[in-house]
Image: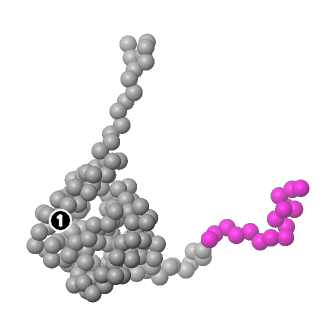
Amino acid sequence: MTLGQVSAGRDRVWARRKRDVIPANKLRARSLRRSPTDAERKLWWHLRYDLDLKGSHFRRQVHVGPYIVDFLSHRLKLIIEVDGGQHASRSVLDAKRTAFLRGRGYRVLRFWNNDVFTNVEGVLAVIQGAVLATPTILATPTPPPPRKGEGR
């Protein structure tokens, strides 16, 4: 049996989705990146220019499953959320969201806008502690010892 005979009766599907249709979640993430809140803008600047740690590459407004998170480092599996006053009344929804993200293997850090404005050094210290606690950052590969007869 040849390949032509196997696929003769079936249509082949080459893509999982239409490329000309942009998902709503992706459009919303783009919109949120274009117009960040003042607290997100401030924390983003500090994440990019003040937090000097290898492997701490963060992205803004990334969708993970059905949710869009404020800041995400894929390598560290770390999510940072900056919450405004509207989140005080949404604690049940935020707990569900956090449970979903943790179920995907991410650690979630939440900060209030007020913390970012009044104590950004403390916020960065917590983030730095979380980054340093990640084993992939601390583990630097050590070269194997030379074998007999090599390196001479």
Which three-letter amino acid code belongs to the residue tagged 1? Val
The residue positioned 33% from the left and 42% from the top of the image is 139
Secondary structure at badge 1 equals helix
Q: Is 29 in front, or is 148?
A: 148
Q: Is 22 in front, or is 133?
A: 133
In the picture, residue 97 is in which quadrant? bottom left
The residue positioned 40% from the left and 68% from the top of the image is 101
The residue positioned 84% from the left and 62% from the top of the image is 6
State yes or no: residue 10 in magenta.
Answer: yes
Q: Can residue 41 be seen in this view?
A: no
What is the magenta segment's predominant secondary structure?
A: loop
Up the image or down, 76 lies above or below 70; here it is above
Tell whether 142 sits left or right of 27: left
Q: Is 88 in front, or is 2?
A: 88
Q: Whole-percent x and y of residue 110?
A: 26, 71
The residue positioned 60% from the left and 74% from the top of the image is 17
Q: Is 3 in front, or is 149?
A: 149
Q: Quadrant for the N terminus, please.
A: bottom right
Q: Whole-percent x and y of residue 70?
A: 32, 72
Up the image or down, 57 lies above or below 112; here it is above
Q: Quadrant for the C terminus, please.
A: top left
State yes or no: residue 78 in magenta.
Answer: no
The residue singled out by tag 1 in the image is: 123
Name, please, the residue furthest toward the left. Answer: 118
Q: Whole-percent x and y of residue 113?
A: 19, 77
Q: Whole-percent x and y of residue 54?
A: 28, 49
Tell whether 12 sits left or right of 96: right
Query: What colour-coding does the image apply?
Result: one colour
Q: Give the range drawn in magenta.
A: 1-16
